[in-house]
Image (spheres, rainbow, N blue to C red):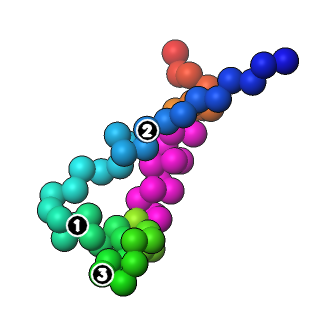
Amino acid sequence: MASRIDFVTMIDRLPKPQSRAEIDSWYNVPHDQHNSDKGLRLYGEAVARVLVDRLAPKQH
């Protein structure tokens, strides 16, 4: 049985940053390039929206 893997480009699902400072707030710069708590929250919210869109029953 073949499996189907759907890849989602998450950058299209994230909020549009208004400045470089806002983007930096999503990461632990200048210390490292890992996500900050804010960045993880934004990414988690985006993933949740994708899952709801794909798995929730469609409303008629």
Residue 11 in magenta stretch = no
Question: Considering the numbered disc 3 on the image, is that residue within a helix, a strand or a loop?
Answer: loop
- Residue 31 in sight: yes
Q: Position of residue 38 (x, y in %)?
A: 39, 70
Left or right of 2: which side holds 47? Answer: left
Going by the numbered disc 3, the residue's amino acid type is Pro
Is residue 47 depicted above or below 55 in this figure? below
Residue 31, position as x, y percentages in the image: 36, 84
Q: Which residue is mark 3?
A: 30
Any magenta on residue 47? yes
Q: Which residues are magenta?
A: 40-51
Q: Residue flagged by tag 2: what amino acid is it?
A: Thr
- Judge whether residue 38 can be spotted in this image: no
Residue 43's disc number = none
Q: Which sits earlier in the primary sequence, circle 1 or circle 3?
A: 1
The label nearer to you, 2 versus 3, is: 3
Q: How many marks?
A: 3
The residue at 49%/43% (across/down) is 49
Q: Which mark is residue 22?
A: 1
- Kindly indicate the quadrant of the structure image that contains residue 9: top left
| Quarter holding residue 6 | top right
State the CA–CA distance, disc 2 to disc 3: 26 Å
Question: In this picture, is 27 found above or below 52?
Answer: below
Instruction: Identify the residue at horizontal 45%, vertical 71% (top origin).
Output: 34
Q: Which mark is residue 9?
A: 2
> Would residue 26 be found to the left or right of residue 1 on screen?
left
In front of the other: 50 or 28: 28
Q: Residue at x 34, y 40 (%)?
A: 12
